Image (cartoon, helix red, strand yellow):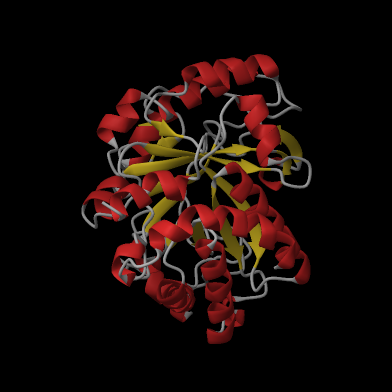
Amino acid sequence: MRRIAWVLVAVGLLLGAGMRGLPAAAQSPARLEPQEGVYFGMNIRWDEDSIVSVANRLGHTPAVVVRFFNFPFTPDDLVQLEDTVSQAALAGAMVMITLEPFDGLETVTPQVAEDLAIRLAAYNAAGVPIFVRFGHEMNGSWYPWCQKPEQYKAAFRLIAEAVHARAPFSAMVWAPNYGGGYPFSGGVYEAQPGTPEFEALDTNNDNVLSMEDDMYAPYYPGDDVVDWVGMSLYHWGHTYPWRENEIPEVGKFIEQLQGRYNGLGGDDRAVPDFHQEYGVARNKPIAIPETAAMYNTEEGGADELVMKRAWWRQVFSAQTRTELLRVRMISWFEIRKHETEIGGALVNWAVTLDPAMAAAFRADLPGYLIFAEGAPILTRTYLPALVR
């Protein structure tokens, strides 16, 4: 980790005096939940973008930056991780690492978990908080770790126990995909009848996997190891295969999180109230680690600004803050990429690449959002309370 050592040491000096002498429990606000407000985050196209570039376009530095990594880490992943943490240290931001076990959940061994925890402890000691989102969208059917509930939960717990033991300013994030359309039939990793996975997911015991089954609970690793709960929640459009650009209905974002959406995209009222069941009832802060409105650059339909503004205005609305009190982080997917779900078409999810759109987006951002501006967030958010 020599590439980031000097950067992290410099940031760490800001924290060292305040943290020394505090009891271990006082040094471990493990959930990293803000005392007030909602963290603003961004998923960045790291091979062609940076925190500084995004901040310059947006006019604000994201409090949280999100990056995806193979897990266990490859040598290239470790280089990318160090670069990400270096950028975050300089910006005073936090990092959400999304760990993707593409070689199978069985590769997550006790030693792999311990090595991760040791690495995160070093980043934390230097003042960079880390959110660990392991095996996101595990209730989908498109990743090798999907629809394997017992194996997934065991791997999550293994990582969480190591992280909690060693890295006091790291938080474990459990983040399924929004449940509308479950079990997402036709995916490569869909659970098959007659398997233990299918039996575990058939929560109503009718020998069929459908939206009548609970699409979240079988995958939940337990309150003792989950610090944050989260959800990927996009506006793709109204009906699959979502090729045309379509304006989202008013209230869609909140209704989906509360399990009461019944609109142009179908009747999703069988989906549980995620905010109530996992945020309020379990007293967990909720993250939206990925959200945006799809703009298919190869199709017609709604105007790009009109469509995206209709989505961001409800995502960042005053109503979101008052009705979804446990939502404490929202991260925009600031990326252009080819999406296999719509035949490989180039989709622009971003809002800051066009200056006019960036200005409109910035003007609509509410005052309750937390950005990484000024002193590092760890210093501003936690140390004042710890040293009082």
Going 61% across and 26% down the picture, which residue do you hit? 58
Instruction: Decide which of 326, 140 is in the foreground and name it.
Output: 326
| Residue 98 position (above or below residue 335) | below
Place of residue 120 in the rendered image (x, y in percent of width and height, measured from the top left): 54, 67
The reply to whether residue 46 is in sight is yes
Place of residue 359 in the rendered image (x, y in percent of width and height, measured from the top left): 60, 16
Residue extending farthest to the left is: 281
Instruction: Decide which of 254, 271 is in the foreground and name it.
Output: 254
The reply to whether residue 244 is in sight is no
User: Is residue 123 found left or right of 268 in the rendered image?
Assistant: right
Can you say which quadrant of the picture contains the N terminus?
Answer: bottom right
Instruction: Decide which of 185, 282 is in the foreground and name it.
Output: 282
Place of residue 226 in the rendered image (x, y in percent of width and height, measured from the top left): 36, 64
User: Total marks drawn?
Assistant: 0
Place of residue 150 in the rendered image (x, y in percent of width and height, measured from the top left): 43, 77
Q: Quadrant of residue 71?
A: bottom right
Instruction: Decide which of 320, 273 is in the foreground and name it.
Output: 320
| Residue 255 position (above or below residue 1) | above
Going 51% across and 16% down the picture, which residue do you hit? 363
Going 61% across and 59% down the picture, which residue do you hit? 9
Going 52% across and 31% down the picture, which residue do you hit? 238
User: Is residue 368 found left or right of 299 in the rendered image?
Assistant: left
User: Is residue 320 found left or right of 313 in the rendered image?
Assistant: left
| Residue 310 position (above or below residue 75) | above
